[in-house]
Amino acid sequence: MSTIPVNLPQASYEITIAPGNLDQLGTHMESLGLKGKALIVSNASIFRHFGERAITALKQAGFDVSTCILPAGERYKTLSTLQKIYDAAQENRFERSSTFVALGGGVIGDMTGFAAASWLRGLNVVQVPTSLLAMVDAAIGGKTGVNHPKGKNLIGAFHQPRLVLIDPQVLKTLPAREFRAAIAEVIKYGVIWDAQLFEQLESAKRLDSLAYMTDDLLQEILVRSCQAKAHVVSKDEKEAGLRAILNYGHTIGHAVESLTGYKLVNHGEGVAIGMVAAGQIAVELNFWDQVSSDRQLALIQKAGLPTQLPATIDIEAILISLQSDKKVESGKVRFVLPTQIGAAKVTDRVPADVIRTVLRQMQSH
Protein backbone atom coordinates (compact mmCIF):
# COMPACT_ATOMS: atom_id res chain seq x y z
CA MET A 1 0.00 0.00 0.00
CA SER A 2 1.16 3.53 -0.82
CA THR A 3 0.12 6.45 1.37
CA ILE A 4 0.59 10.02 0.16
CA PRO A 5 0.00 12.92 2.58
CA VAL A 6 -1.69 16.12 1.44
CA ASN A 7 -0.39 18.63 3.98
CA LEU A 8 -2.65 21.65 4.45
CA PRO A 9 -2.85 24.21 7.27
CA GLN A 10 -6.42 23.35 8.29
CA ALA A 11 -7.37 20.09 6.65
CA SER A 12 -4.55 17.65 5.96
CA TYR A 13 -5.51 14.18 4.73
CA GLU A 14 -4.06 11.12 3.08
CA ILE A 15 -4.37 9.44 -0.29
CA THR A 16 -4.17 5.68 0.12
CA ILE A 17 -3.49 3.45 -2.92
CA ALA A 18 -3.75 -0.36 -2.72
CA PRO A 19 -5.32 -3.22 -4.69
CA GLY A 20 -8.48 -4.34 -2.85
CA ASN A 21 -8.64 -1.04 -0.96
CA LEU A 22 -12.39 -0.67 -1.60
CA ASP A 23 -13.09 -3.47 0.88
CA GLN A 24 -11.17 -1.52 3.55
CA LEU A 25 -13.25 1.67 3.11
CA GLY A 26 -15.05 1.39 6.46
CA THR A 27 -11.87 0.52 8.36
CA HIS A 28 -10.04 3.55 6.90
CA MET A 29 -12.94 5.89 7.72
CA GLU A 30 -13.29 4.49 11.23
CA SER A 31 -9.58 5.07 11.88
CA LEU A 32 -10.13 8.78 11.10
CA GLY A 33 -12.80 8.96 13.81
CA LEU A 34 -15.65 9.07 11.30
CA LYS A 35 -18.83 7.31 12.43
CA GLY A 36 -22.60 7.39 12.24
CA LYS A 37 -24.39 8.06 8.98
CA ALA A 38 -22.79 7.67 5.55
CA LEU A 39 -24.39 8.50 2.19
CA ILE A 40 -22.89 6.76 -0.83
CA VAL A 41 -23.36 8.95 -3.92
CA SER A 42 -22.82 7.17 -7.23
CA ASN A 43 -24.30 6.58 -10.67
CA ALA A 44 -26.13 3.43 -11.79
CA SER A 45 -23.32 1.73 -13.73
CA ILE A 46 -20.62 2.38 -11.10
CA PHE A 47 -22.98 1.35 -8.32
CA ARG A 48 -23.82 -1.88 -10.15
CA HIS A 49 -20.13 -2.81 -10.14
CA PHE A 50 -19.02 -1.56 -6.72
CA GLY A 51 -22.02 -0.43 -4.67
CA GLU A 52 -22.51 -3.62 -2.67
CA ARG A 53 -18.83 -3.84 -1.78
CA ALA A 54 -18.82 -0.24 -0.55
CA ILE A 55 -22.02 -0.77 1.49
CA THR A 56 -20.63 -3.98 3.04
CA ALA A 57 -17.30 -2.32 3.90
CA LEU A 58 -19.12 0.56 5.64
CA LYS A 59 -21.65 -1.59 7.47
CA GLN A 60 -18.91 -3.87 8.79
CA ALA A 61 -17.35 -0.79 10.38
CA GLY A 62 -20.66 0.15 11.99
CA PHE A 63 -21.85 2.90 9.63
CA ASP A 64 -25.54 3.55 9.02
CA VAL A 65 -25.53 3.54 5.19
CA SER A 66 -27.90 5.14 2.68
CA THR A 67 -27.44 5.67 -1.07
CA CYS A 68 -28.12 8.31 -3.71
CA ILE A 69 -27.91 7.34 -7.40
CA LEU A 70 -27.40 10.20 -9.88
CA PRO A 71 -27.61 10.19 -13.69
CA ALA A 72 -24.23 9.65 -15.37
CA GLY A 73 -22.42 12.25 -17.44
CA GLU A 74 -21.01 15.77 -17.47
CA ARG A 75 -24.28 17.25 -18.76
CA TYR A 76 -25.97 16.25 -15.49
CA LYS A 77 -23.40 18.09 -13.39
CA THR A 78 -25.95 20.78 -12.53
CA LEU A 79 -27.66 22.43 -9.59
CA SER A 80 -30.84 20.44 -10.27
CA THR A 81 -28.97 17.12 -10.00
CA LEU A 82 -27.32 18.37 -6.79
CA GLN A 83 -30.81 18.69 -5.29
CA LYS A 84 -31.05 14.86 -5.23
CA ILE A 85 -28.09 14.67 -2.83
CA TYR A 86 -29.59 17.36 -0.60
CA ASP A 87 -32.92 15.52 -0.61
CA ALA A 88 -31.23 12.24 0.42
CA ALA A 89 -29.33 14.01 3.21
CA GLN A 90 -32.52 15.64 4.47
CA GLU A 91 -34.56 12.41 4.29
CA ASN A 92 -31.92 10.49 6.22
CA ARG A 93 -31.52 13.27 8.80
CA PHE A 94 -27.84 13.87 8.20
CA GLU A 95 -25.89 15.76 10.86
CA ARG A 96 -22.62 17.66 10.71
CA SER A 97 -20.81 14.54 11.92
CA SER A 98 -22.20 12.49 8.99
CA THR A 99 -20.18 11.67 5.87
CA PHE A 100 -20.84 11.78 2.13
CA VAL A 101 -18.93 9.10 0.20
CA ALA A 102 -18.31 9.88 -3.48
CA LEU A 103 -18.13 6.54 -5.33
CA GLY A 104 -17.48 7.33 -8.97
CA GLY A 105 -15.56 9.45 -11.45
CA GLY A 106 -14.86 13.17 -11.47
CA VAL A 107 -18.47 14.25 -11.99
CA ILE A 108 -19.68 12.30 -8.94
CA GLY A 109 -16.67 13.51 -6.92
CA ASP A 110 -17.20 17.17 -7.83
CA MET A 111 -20.93 17.10 -7.07
CA THR A 112 -20.65 15.09 -3.86
CA GLY A 113 -17.85 17.36 -2.66
CA PHE A 114 -19.89 20.48 -3.37
CA ALA A 115 -22.95 18.99 -1.65
CA ALA A 116 -20.75 18.23 1.37
CA ALA A 117 -19.32 21.77 1.33
CA SER A 118 -22.76 23.34 1.30
CA TRP A 119 -25.08 20.99 3.27
CA LEU A 120 -25.30 22.19 6.90
CA ARG A 121 -22.47 24.56 5.89
CA GLY A 122 -20.06 21.69 5.54
CA LEU A 123 -19.78 18.04 6.47
CA ASN A 124 -17.27 15.25 5.87
CA VAL A 125 -16.62 13.87 2.41
CA VAL A 126 -14.57 10.83 1.44
CA GLN A 127 -13.51 10.46 -2.19
CA VAL A 128 -13.49 6.93 -3.65
CA PRO A 129 -12.57 7.57 -7.30
CA THR A 130 -13.41 4.78 -9.74
CA SER A 131 -11.95 6.31 -12.92
CA LEU A 132 -8.25 6.87 -13.60
CA LEU A 133 -8.97 10.54 -14.29
CA ALA A 134 -10.54 11.03 -10.87
CA MET A 135 -7.74 9.03 -9.19
CA VAL A 136 -4.92 11.16 -10.56
CA ASP A 137 -6.70 14.49 -10.57
CA ALA A 138 -10.30 15.31 -9.65
CA ALA A 139 -10.50 13.50 -6.29
CA ILE A 140 -7.43 15.30 -4.91
CA GLY A 141 -7.25 18.93 -3.90
CA GLY A 142 -10.71 19.85 -2.68
CA LYS A 143 -12.05 21.55 -5.81
CA THR A 144 -15.78 20.87 -5.95
CA GLY A 145 -18.60 22.24 -8.04
CA VAL A 146 -21.19 22.03 -10.79
CA ASN A 147 -21.47 23.53 -14.24
CA HIS A 148 -23.42 26.64 -15.21
CA PRO A 149 -25.08 26.65 -18.66
CA LYS A 150 -22.48 29.25 -19.72
CA GLY A 151 -19.38 27.49 -18.41
CA LYS A 152 -17.75 24.59 -16.63
CA ASN A 153 -17.37 24.50 -12.82
CA LEU A 154 -18.45 28.12 -12.39
CA ILE A 155 -20.44 27.24 -9.24
CA GLY A 156 -18.30 25.62 -6.57
CA ALA A 157 -16.23 25.72 -3.40
CA PHE A 158 -12.95 24.43 -2.02
CA HIS A 159 -13.79 21.59 0.37
CA GLN A 160 -11.05 19.11 1.19
CA PRO A 161 -11.91 15.42 1.61
CA ARG A 162 -11.12 13.59 4.83
CA LEU A 163 -9.63 10.75 2.78
CA VAL A 164 -8.98 9.75 -0.84
CA LEU A 165 -9.18 5.98 -1.20
CA ILE A 166 -7.83 4.48 -4.44
CA ASP A 167 -8.22 0.85 -5.50
CA PRO A 168 -6.45 0.25 -8.86
CA GLN A 169 -8.42 -2.97 -9.37
CA VAL A 170 -11.66 -1.06 -9.99
CA LEU A 171 -10.16 0.25 -13.25
CA LYS A 172 -10.76 -3.15 -14.87
CA THR A 173 -14.33 -2.04 -15.65
CA LEU A 174 -13.28 1.37 -17.02
CA PRO A 175 -14.13 1.90 -20.72
CA ALA A 176 -11.01 2.19 -22.93
CA ARG A 177 -11.85 5.74 -24.00
CA GLU A 178 -12.06 6.86 -20.36
CA PHE A 179 -8.70 5.26 -19.63
CA ARG A 180 -7.03 7.06 -22.55
CA ALA A 181 -8.62 10.36 -21.50
CA ALA A 182 -7.04 10.03 -18.05
CA ILE A 183 -3.59 9.40 -19.51
CA ALA A 184 -3.79 13.01 -20.79
CA GLU A 185 -3.73 14.23 -17.17
CA VAL A 186 -0.84 11.86 -16.38
CA ILE A 187 1.14 13.26 -19.34
CA LYS A 188 0.30 16.74 -18.00
CA TYR A 189 2.05 15.97 -14.69
CA GLY A 190 5.08 14.75 -16.62
CA VAL A 191 5.27 17.97 -18.65
CA ILE A 192 4.71 20.49 -15.83
CA TRP A 193 6.28 18.76 -12.84
CA ASP A 194 7.89 15.33 -13.14
CA ALA A 195 10.36 14.73 -15.98
CA GLN A 196 11.03 11.22 -14.68
CA LEU A 197 7.35 10.32 -15.03
CA PHE A 198 7.43 11.72 -18.58
CA GLU A 199 10.39 9.47 -19.44
CA GLN A 200 8.68 6.43 -17.88
CA LEU A 201 5.67 7.07 -20.10
CA GLU A 202 7.96 7.40 -23.12
CA SER A 203 9.56 4.03 -22.37
CA ALA A 204 6.21 2.21 -21.87
CA LYS A 205 5.31 -0.08 -24.77
CA ARG A 206 1.75 1.24 -25.06
CA LEU A 207 -0.35 3.81 -23.24
CA ASP A 208 -3.66 3.47 -25.07
CA SER A 209 -5.12 0.61 -23.03
CA LEU A 210 -5.04 -0.74 -19.49
CA ALA A 211 -4.71 -4.25 -20.95
CA TYR A 212 -1.12 -3.48 -22.05
CA MET A 213 -0.06 -1.83 -18.80
CA THR A 214 1.78 -3.74 -16.09
CA ASP A 215 0.52 -3.49 -12.50
CA ASP A 216 3.86 -1.92 -11.55
CA LEU A 217 3.57 0.82 -14.18
CA LEU A 218 -0.04 1.52 -13.19
CA GLN A 219 0.94 1.80 -9.52
CA GLU A 220 3.85 4.07 -10.49
CA ILE A 221 1.56 6.29 -12.59
CA LEU A 222 -0.93 6.55 -9.72
CA VAL A 223 1.69 7.25 -7.06
CA ARG A 224 3.70 9.80 -9.06
CA SER A 225 0.60 11.61 -10.36
CA CYS A 226 -0.93 11.79 -6.88
CA GLN A 227 2.39 12.97 -5.43
CA ALA A 228 2.60 15.74 -8.02
CA LYS A 229 -0.95 16.91 -7.34
CA ALA A 230 -0.52 16.60 -3.55
CA HIS A 231 2.74 18.56 -3.65
CA VAL A 232 1.26 21.43 -5.67
CA VAL A 233 -1.97 21.55 -3.62
CA SER A 234 0.02 21.52 -0.35
CA LYS A 235 1.92 24.59 -1.49
CA ASP A 236 -1.13 26.41 -2.87
CA GLU A 237 -4.50 25.17 -1.61
CA LYS A 238 -6.75 27.86 -3.14
CA GLU A 239 -4.98 28.45 -6.46
CA ALA A 240 -3.36 31.74 -5.53
CA GLY A 241 -0.22 30.98 -7.53
CA LEU A 242 1.58 27.70 -8.17
CA ARG A 243 -1.57 25.56 -8.34
CA ALA A 244 -2.54 27.31 -11.57
CA ILE A 245 0.06 25.17 -13.39
CA LEU A 246 -2.32 22.20 -12.93
CA ASN A 247 -4.50 23.89 -15.54
CA TYR A 248 -1.95 23.08 -18.24
CA GLY A 249 -3.88 22.17 -21.40
CA HIS A 250 -7.17 23.07 -19.73
CA THR A 251 -7.58 26.62 -21.02
CA ILE A 252 -8.17 25.67 -24.66
CA GLY A 253 -9.29 22.19 -23.57
CA HIS A 254 -12.29 23.52 -21.63
CA ALA A 255 -13.25 25.76 -24.56
CA VAL A 256 -13.20 22.77 -26.93
CA GLU A 257 -15.26 20.69 -24.48
CA SER A 258 -17.96 23.32 -24.00
CA LEU A 259 -18.13 24.31 -27.69
CA THR A 260 -18.81 20.67 -28.59
CA GLY A 261 -21.54 20.46 -25.92
CA TYR A 262 -19.53 17.99 -23.77
CA LYS A 263 -20.56 15.28 -26.25
CA LEU A 264 -17.96 15.06 -29.02
CA VAL A 265 -14.82 15.58 -26.93
CA ASN A 266 -14.45 14.36 -23.35
CA HIS A 267 -12.38 16.14 -20.70
CA GLY A 268 -9.12 14.25 -21.22
CA GLU A 269 -9.38 14.55 -24.99
CA GLY A 270 -9.92 18.30 -24.61
CA VAL A 271 -6.86 18.51 -22.35
CA ALA A 272 -4.80 16.56 -24.93
CA ILE A 273 -5.78 19.03 -27.67
CA GLY A 274 -5.13 21.91 -25.25
CA MET A 275 -1.64 20.59 -24.39
CA VAL A 276 -0.69 20.30 -28.07
CA ALA A 277 -1.86 23.91 -28.55
CA ALA A 278 -0.09 25.19 -25.42
CA GLY A 279 3.10 23.36 -26.42
CA GLN A 280 3.12 25.02 -29.84
CA ILE A 281 2.24 28.43 -28.36
CA ALA A 282 5.24 27.99 -26.03
CA VAL A 283 7.45 27.26 -29.07
CA GLU A 284 6.11 30.36 -30.90
CA LEU A 285 6.91 32.51 -27.84
CA ASN A 286 10.36 30.89 -27.40
CA PHE A 287 9.46 29.47 -23.98
CA TRP A 288 10.56 25.98 -24.95
CA ASP A 289 11.92 24.17 -27.98
CA GLN A 290 10.33 22.30 -30.88
CA VAL A 291 12.03 19.02 -29.86
CA SER A 292 10.26 19.06 -26.48
CA SER A 293 6.95 19.97 -28.12
CA ASP A 294 7.39 17.06 -30.55
CA ARG A 295 8.15 14.66 -27.68
CA GLN A 296 4.93 15.76 -26.00
CA LEU A 297 2.99 15.31 -29.26
CA ALA A 298 4.41 11.79 -29.72
CA LEU A 299 3.39 10.82 -26.18
CA ILE A 300 -0.16 12.12 -26.67
CA GLN A 301 -0.43 10.18 -29.94
CA LYS A 302 0.96 7.06 -28.24
CA ALA A 303 -1.92 7.32 -25.75
CA GLY A 304 -4.38 7.26 -28.66
CA LEU A 305 -5.55 10.80 -27.90
CA PRO A 306 -6.63 13.48 -30.40
CA THR A 307 -4.03 16.08 -31.34
CA GLN A 308 -6.08 18.16 -33.77
CA LEU A 309 -9.04 20.48 -33.37
CA PRO A 310 -12.36 19.08 -34.58
CA ALA A 311 -13.13 20.56 -38.01
CA THR A 312 -16.54 21.75 -36.80
CA ILE A 313 -15.14 24.19 -34.23
CA ASP A 314 -14.93 27.85 -35.12
CA ILE A 315 -11.56 29.24 -34.01
CA GLU A 316 -13.03 32.69 -33.26
CA ALA A 317 -15.58 30.98 -30.97
CA ILE A 318 -12.65 29.48 -29.02
CA LEU A 319 -11.10 32.93 -28.57
CA ILE A 320 -14.46 34.29 -27.31
CA SER A 321 -14.90 31.28 -25.01
CA LEU A 322 -11.44 31.86 -23.49
CA GLN A 323 -12.65 35.23 -22.20
CA SER A 324 -15.24 33.59 -19.93
CA ASP A 325 -12.71 31.13 -18.47
CA LYS A 326 -12.39 31.12 -14.65
CA LYS A 327 -8.68 31.85 -15.04
CA VAL A 328 -9.16 35.24 -16.74
CA GLU A 329 -7.76 38.15 -14.73
CA SER A 330 -8.43 41.78 -15.70
CA GLY A 331 -9.68 40.57 -19.06
CA LYS A 332 -6.42 38.74 -19.82
CA VAL A 333 -6.41 35.00 -20.44
CA ARG A 334 -3.81 33.20 -18.34
CA PHE A 335 -2.01 30.37 -20.09
CA VAL A 336 0.15 27.68 -18.52
CA LEU A 337 3.10 27.17 -20.84
CA PRO A 338 5.94 24.67 -20.49
CA THR A 339 9.52 25.94 -20.21
CA GLN A 340 11.12 22.46 -20.22
CA ILE A 341 9.89 18.92 -19.66
CA GLY A 342 9.14 18.92 -15.93
CA ALA A 343 8.54 22.69 -15.56
CA ALA A 344 5.97 25.28 -16.59
CA LYS A 345 4.95 28.86 -15.87
CA VAL A 346 1.80 30.96 -16.04
CA THR A 347 1.60 33.97 -18.33
CA ASP A 348 -1.13 36.35 -19.49
CA ARG A 349 1.00 37.64 -22.37
CA VAL A 350 -0.13 35.42 -25.20
CA PRO A 351 -1.19 37.50 -28.21
CA ALA A 352 -4.50 36.47 -29.78
CA ASP A 353 -2.87 36.16 -33.22
CA VAL A 354 -0.40 33.55 -31.88
CA ILE A 355 -3.33 31.52 -30.48
CA ARG A 356 -5.12 31.89 -33.83
CA THR A 357 -2.10 30.76 -35.84
CA VAL A 358 -1.50 27.67 -33.70
CA LEU A 359 -5.18 26.68 -33.71
CA ARG A 360 -5.38 27.03 -37.51
CA GLN A 361 -2.39 24.68 -37.84
CA MET A 362 -4.21 22.20 -35.62
CA GLN A 363 -7.58 22.28 -37.39
CA SER A 364 -8.33 18.94 -39.03
CA HIS A 365 -9.95 19.36 -42.41
Image (spheres, rainbow, N blue to C red):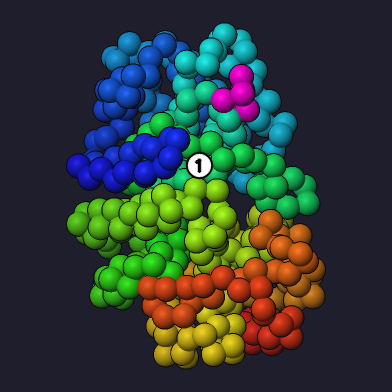
Residue 22, percent from left and from top: 31, 32
Does residue 220 appear anywhere in the picture?
yes
Does residue 167 appear anywhere in the picture?
no
Q: At 57% from the left edge and 55% from the top edge, which residue is drawn?
A: 240
Relative to 127, does residue 99 appear above or below in the rendering?
above
Q: Residue furthest front?
A: 9
68 in the magenta segment: no
Residue 43 or residue 96, whichever sits in front: 96
Q: At 58% from the left edge and 63% from the top edge, which residue is drawn?
A: 250
Q: At 47% from the left edge and 15% from the top edge, which residue is drawn?
A: 97
Relative to 68, does residue 339 appear above or below in the rendering?
below
Q: Secondary structure at mark 1?
A: loop
Q: At 28% from the left edge and 23% from the top edge, which residue is drawn?
A: 31
Residue 78, percent from left and from top: 69, 38
Within-10-Å neighbours for mark 1: few <14, some 14–19, many 20+: many
Q: Main secondary structure of the magenta part?
A: helix
How many numbered markers are drawn? 1
**Is 183 on the left or on the right of 364, as rendered?**
left
Quick one: quadrant of the C terminus? bottom right
- The residue beneath circle 1 is 142
Q: Which residues are magenta?
A: 118-122
What kind of residue is marked 1? Answer: Gly
- Residue 46, by quadrant, is top left
Residue 189, percent from left and from top: 41, 64
**Is 166 on the left or on the right of 89, as rendered?**
left
Relative to 351, does residue 247 appear above or below in the rendering?
above
